Image (tube, rainbow, N blue to C red):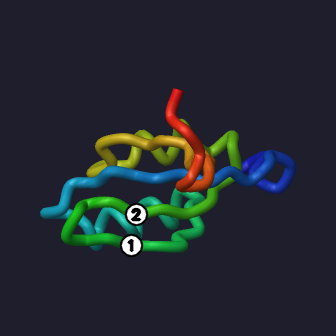
Amino acid sequence: MSGADTSPQVGVILSVDPDRFTRTVEAARRAGLHVTSEQPLLGSLSGTVAENRIPALAAVDGVLSVDRDRPVSLPPPDTPVP
């Protein structure tokens, strides 16, 4: 994992083949993913990874997609809709 120590950590959400979930999670860990949440029935997991490891993570057998985890802000419930 060359350069993993100098690249910033980013949050990611992975969509994986549910039929190969366990094997895919283990391979993603070997590719540098620190898993924070697993949803095997949905075929997704989330975690953090060095930014420069995202291409290696996307290449893991069984990974269907890798998306950056992005915060979403909603206005208070009583805010008028324009």
Write down the residue under mark 1.
38
Q: Type of residue at label 2?
A: Leu
Mark 1 or mark 2: whose residue is earlier in sequence: 1
Element class at badge 1: strand
Write down the residue under mark 2.
45
Q: Quadrant of residue 65?
A: top left
Q: Is residue 40 above or below residue 24?
A: below
Q: Residue furthest left?
A: 19
Question: Is label 1 in contact with label 2 (beta carbons under 8 Å)?
Answer: yes
Q: Residue at x 74, y 48 (%)?
A: 2
Q: How far across and how far down the image is residue 29, in percent?
A: 50, 66
Q: How far across and how far down the image is residue 11, in percent?
A: 62, 54
Q: Residue at x 68, y 50 (%)?
A: 10
The tally of labels here is: 2
Please tell me the numbered disc located at residue 48: none
Q: Quadrant of residue 21?
A: bottom left
Q: Type of residue at label 1?
A: Glu
Q: Quadrant of residue 33?
A: bottom right
